[in-house]
Amino acid sequence: MKIKVANKKREAPPKFNGKFGLDGGLDFGSYTRQWLKKFIKENPEMPFELVPLLPESEEQRGFFEGAICTLVAFYQEGMDYRNYKDVKKVREWLCLEFNGELVVISGKAHRVAKTTKNALTGFLERVEDWIIENYAPPKEVFITTYYKNWRDKLKPLGETKTETFIDYLLEIKILK
């Protein structure tokens, strides 16, 4: 006797985003709560993972935009790290390359950049690893205190005439 097994394609379960309530409970909002209850009924005893969404800091985003993207433009032949359009192209490429996903449309695969919101830390680590592997810059270019010092103290107070962080790194002879 043959046993016929249904060959169902397994789909990833949906994400149910919520937050911890002030009372110590979970708050999903009324719409999400409705879908979560339905999902629980349809999938009893399914294991799940509760992972906090850690907010990125504005400083982390600023370091990516002002230091990492300009550094890649600095190393790229034919690009100017002082040119906003070149830096923007680098940013878009980094997001596509290091935070992209393949989407099949009409049988053809396309790479689409995902958002880096709430995923910036891992994304930055992948980009920094790639920069180190390809360009071997001095370790100091990744030390955020250099960037913070330039952005918050030296530039606003006029203690440096450099317009970009890369110019500052060139001035203090970290980059050559």
Image: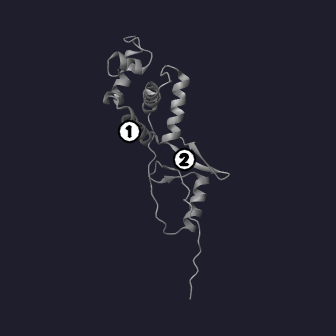
Total marks placed: 2
Q: In the image shown, does 2 or 66 lie closer to the viewer?
A: 2
Give the structural element (helix, strand or loop) at label 2.
strand
What residue is shown with label 1?
129
Q: Quadrant of residue 160?
A: top left
Mark 1 crowd level (few <14, some 14–19, many ≥20, 10 Å Cα): few
* Disc 2 from disc 1: Cα separation: 19 Å
- Residue at 47 percent across and 25 percent down: it is 77
What residue is shown with label 2?
101
Rendered location of residue 10, percent (x, y): 56, 64
Contact between marks 2 and 1 (CB within 8 A): the answer is no
Rendered location of residue 12, percent (x, y): 54, 59
Query: Relative to 34, is 160 above or below?
Result: above
Q: In the image shown, does 163 or 158 lie closer to the viewer?
A: 163
Query: Relative to 123, is 5 above or below?
Result: below
Numbered tag placed on residue 107 in the rendering: none
Rendered location of residue 4, percent (x, y): 58, 80
- For the N terminus, the quadrant is bottom right
- For the C terminus, the quadrant is top left
- Residue at 52 percent across and 69 percent down: it is 44
Q: Residue furthest bottom?
A: 1
Query: Relative to 160, is 99 above or below?
Result: below
Give the structural element (helix, strand or loop) at label 1.
helix
Amino acid carrying mark 1 in the image: Asp
Amino acid carrying mark 2 in the image: Glu
- Residue at 38 percent across and 31 percent down: it is 135
Q: In the image shown, does 127 or 20 lie closer to the viewer?
A: 127
Rendered location of residue 121, percent (x, y): 42, 40
Lateral position of residue 176 relative to residue 25, left or right: left
Mark 2 crowd level (few <14, some 14–19, many ≥20, 10 Å Cα): some
